[in-house]
Image (cartoon, rainbow, N blue to C red):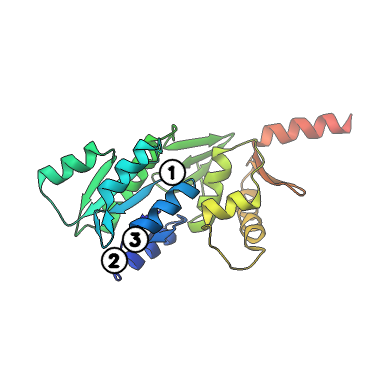
Amino acid sequence: MLLEDDRRLGPLVTRGLRTEGYAVDPATTIEEARWLATENEYDALILDLVVPDGDGIDLCAELRSAENWTPCLLLTARDAVEDRVNGLDAGADDYLVKPFAFEELLARVRAIIRRGPVPRPTVLEVGSLRIDVAGRAATIDGSSVVVAGREFALLELLARRVGTVVDRATILEHVWDWAYDGTSNVVDVHVHGLRCRLAEHRGAPTIETVRGAGYVLRPAQLVEVGATRGRR
């Protein structure tokens, strides 16, 4: 979730994050951000320090008091040490001063997501598939898998829940955003594309469709064992 009231910067950051495969819910007021943060489960919060109806530091402190430990990055034009200390003491995980390079924002977002609230390793392994989350790269037995944007985000989500069925609503929430109103088959289209990319590599994990439930990523060896038992 991104809280930023600047009419130019807010849409710019939102668009940039979405291009990198993140689902983003934008907010321009404390009230809107508070509602989003309490009604949804996020991987990270990016909060502007000063908006017309309040302060990002106060919102961060409020969320921490309510035991919401979603990683939080503060954005601000203030560069005084006291302001940075106040933000970190309020429970923020990191602090970025404007103006900033978008690449640095991305790196900091990746870092706070890795740190918690639950362990988030920088490298995921599913059988022969290896996903470098920070580097936005995937390989199978050392061979590069060409996957980017939404497909990479989808692959990461399924890999983090390997062996578990992930329903369409969860995929839409994490790979797109809660307000997505595009085509109804967008998940199926991206799953099909990802399957094709994985199928180009021998021994790749497979994405199974569980009718009426969703999709599950399984290592190749598990599928082979199951197929053998089925023939008996």
Q: Closer to the camera: disc 2 or disc 3?
A: 3
Query: Would you say 22 lies left or right of 92 here?
Result: right
Residue located 33% across and 65% down the image: 10
State the residue lying farthest toward the right.
Answer: 232
Residue 223 on image: x %, y %: 73, 36
What amino acid type should be assigned to the residue bearing mark 2?
A: Leu
Residue beneath disc 2: 9
Query: Would you say 39 lies left or right of 158 here?
Result: left
Q: Closer to the camera: disc 1 or disc 2?
A: 2
Residue 52 on image: x %, y %: 26, 63
- Label 1 or label 3, whichever comes before in sequence order: 3
Residue beneath disc 1: 133
Within 10 Å of disc 2 (Cα), the crowding (few <14, some 14-19, many 20+) is few
**SS for callout 1:** loop
Q: As rendered, which of 177 and 48 lies closer to the eye?
A: 48
What amino acid type should be assigned to the residue bearing mark 3?
A: Thr
Residue beneath disc 3: 29
**SS for callout 3:** loop
Could you tell me how far apart the alpha carbons at marks 1 and 3 are, in whole angstroms? 31 Å
